[in-house]
Amino acid sequence: MMTNPNGIVTQGQFSFLPPLTDVQITAQLKYALKHDWAIGIEYTDDPHPRNTYWEMFGNPMFDLKDPAGILLEINNCRKTFPNHYIRVVASSAVRGVESVTMSYIVNRPKKEPGFGLVRQEVEGRNIRYTIHSYATDKPEGERY
Amino acid sequence: MSKVNETMKEGKERYKAGVLPYKKMGYWQPDYVPKDTDLLAMFRLTPQAGLDPEEIAAAVAGESSTATWTVVWTDRLTACELYRAKAYKCELVPNTGEGTKTEAQYFAYIAYDLDLFEGGSIANLTASIIGNVFGMKAVKALRLEDMRIPVAYLKTFQGPATGVIVERERLDKFGRPLLGATTKPKLGLSGRNYGRVVYEALKGGLDFVKDDENINSQPFMHWRDRFLYCMDAVNKASAATGEVKGHYLNVTAGTMEEMYKRAEFAKQLGSIIIMIDLVIGYTAIQSMAIWCRQNDMILHLHRAGNSTYSRQKNHGMNFRVICKWMRMAGVDHIHAGTVVGKLEGDPMMIRGFYDTLLDTHTKPQLEKGLFFEQDWASLNKCLPVASGGIHAGQMHQLLTYLGDDVILQFGGGTIGHPQGIQAGAVANRVALEAMVLARNEGRDIWNEGPQILLAAAKWCGPLRAAIDTWKDISFNYESTDTADFVPVATGSH
């Protein structure tokens, strides 16, 4: 069990709010589409803070402009990976940005084991820190 | 104003020993068309009574480039016409002079050739532009209002070590302002107690905690203790939340050698960010920015000392110029005002600072105090920091005024929360996320902001308590640094 105030991994834009409903997600999809950002869906069973590359549930949907269609894909991903972390990621291709502009979690495992902090005591009072995902103690595909 | 170019022709007469008005020496050229490669500067002049403003503008151009008080024949050994800065425009500032409460002020525009400056050196640039002229007897007061830096010169600077885009990628935080707090009390805590504040605030939900400008290495807490305890706090909070977290470790010290030593220790402990103060000087800032680029480190700058010369409207320099220089010098964060907090700031002026730090290309916008078009030549963006007297109850105003690319720092608003530091952090994070969500949904957060916060406070006790504690706190004082031009409905200048 995680001991932070929410008891969950708080990555993304909206992890401190109650889980987003499909209506709320649709509104956020519309916001991204209005800015001409491409929306992608990504999932993982290792939410380590520095695990950048979650698996892509298909390529970013550059040409899909219908929020209902994108929501359908999100729900397909949830059905396929009900116990994984799933995030919606928007990307801008505008010069000076060319990066992620939105990222929020829309699915998470029922139990989130969190992370351990491994302190390697080295010379003097120095410590080398490693953050360890408890989930990764189990093999891929068997983690939640 | 006159459009007469009074410059004397080059030749024997021009170089006769003696004193010549600056206008005649070639420093006033109303028909000069600035080149794309020129540096442009705009000064606010308050001439001594009875003096010709154009002559004063020419004097500023002269004394900030090649001139001295008298004619010297050695000019004739140089391509002196090129090296002379040229005052090319001088106009009365609106609402000053006869019939107003303010004595006459003038906006003087001066062009400098690129060859007057050493590439990649803020020190050299500033030694010319602000080196001498502010003490000239002929001006009662003088203020550097804005500069246009040509692309050719910008390309000689590294720029922000990390930049907003890469910083967000490293932090894995997108589409919302970042949240921070400054540890309080700023002086007196032991390393162990200090780290406690850092841990609680980060675990509660902030992205960053920050040393204050004057936390270096004092008897109550030496720097190595602070670094060791803070990094334990940062890593423990990161593990507790699954998020990348940071603490700005202030490496400001008396010498470069000492600053490098502290920066190396921060890196060895795994810190993602270090901090310096503006008072270390332009050259030291550039050196630290280069070190940060080489060591994957974000560089936070506290603008300590700036108000000694940026606050008064008639003398010193506008903060937007500091913003430009600091983006060139290579810092990733700079404190740039809150609008609603305890420190100086007119909303449009502050937006101008933010645009200066974040734009790829800025158009002139007089109502924001932006006098020049500025192409930023792909220099990284620098993240503005809003810090000082802000709290969760102002979230709708902060998001409206400042947008997503900003770090909102709630020091007292986190640590002073009645239910504790973690609760304070939760209140701020919930208020922020609720407001971003609502804005993205298309709601009018400026007007509906208080209801949005109250709705979130129904399920979030810490937010409820924050609103109850600070609901009546605001800092409504008139700004000293305001626009000279008001926007008009039809909007063209």
Image: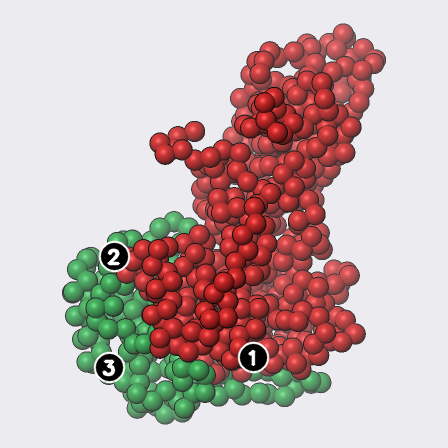
Q: Residues within 10 Å of mark 3 (few under 14, many from 20)?
A: some
Give the amino acid at mark 1. Answer: Tyr
Look at discs 3 and 2 and give the one toward the viewer: 2
Which label's residue is closer to the chain start, 3 or 2? 2
Give the chain of mark 2: A
> Residue B16's spot in the image, x, y percent?
81, 10
Q: On the same chain: label 2 and label 1?
A: no
Above or below, B470 against B378 in this view is below
Give the Cα distance between marks 3 and 2: 25 Å
User: Quarter-wise, where is residue B194 in the image?
Assistant: bottom right
**Residue A81 badge:** 3
Give the position of the C terminus of chain B as an image quadrant. Answer: top left
Q: Which residue is mark 1?
A: B199
Q: Residues within 10 Å of mark 1 (few under 14, many from 20)?
A: many
> Residue B122's spot in the image, x, y percent?
66, 44
User: Quarter-wise, where is residue B277 in the image?
Assistant: bottom right
Q: Which residue is mark 2?
A: A33
Give the chain of mark 1: B
Residue B304, can we see it?
A: yes
Above or below, B484 against A141 in this view is above
Which chain gets the red colouring? B
